[in-house]
């Protein structure tokens, strides 16, 4: 978005990307997909919601 409204140039945007941060983002995406496909995300959500149902909002 910043490139489109000409706040920064494309070269400035690419120079700000750190390889370790890009690897972390890629790893989190892969992990999230694996959790969703395997059903672990659904199970964890059901467990969490089940435990929180008993609590009052106040």
Image (spheres, helix red, strand yellow):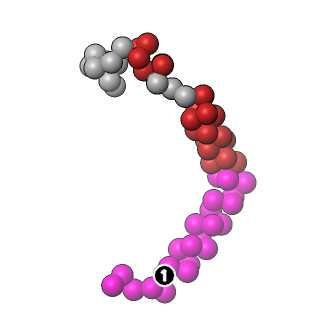
Q: Quadrant of residue 10?
A: top left
Front position in the image: 45 or 13:
13
Q: Is residue 3 shown left or right of residue 38?
A: left
Q: Is residue 8 shown left or right of residue 16?
A: left
Q: Which residue bears the numbered disc 1?
A: 53
Q: Which quadrant of the figure contains the N terminus?
A: top left
- Where residue 15 appears, as percent x and y from the top left, is 48, 19
Q: Is residue 42 shown left or right of residue 15?
A: right
Vertical side of 24 occupied by 35: above or below = below
- Where residue 23 appears, as percent x and y from the top left, is 63, 34
Residue drawn at 50 percent across, 79 percent down: 52
Vertical side of 4 occupied by 57: above or below = below
Residue drawn at 61 percent across, 39 percent down: 24
- Per the rendered image, the range of residues in magenta is 35-58
The main secondary structure of the magenta stretch is: helix
Where disc 1 sits, the SS reads loop
- Where residue 36 appears, as percent x and y from the top left, is 65, 52
Residue drawn at 67 percent across, 47 percent down: 31
Q: Quadrant of residue 3?
A: top left
Front position in the image: 16 or 55:
16
Q: Which quadrant of the figure contains the C terminus?
A: bottom left
Q: Is residue 39 magenta?
A: yes
Vertical side of 16 occupied by 55: above or below = below
């Amino acid at each position: 978005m910043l490139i489109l409204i000409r706040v920064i140039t494309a070269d400035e945007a690419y120079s700000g990307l750190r390889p370790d941060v890009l690897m972390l983002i890629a790893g989190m995406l892969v992990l999230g997909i694996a959790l969703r496909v395997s059903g672990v995300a659904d199970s964890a959500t059901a467990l969490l919601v089940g435990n929180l149902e008993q609590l009052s909002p106040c």
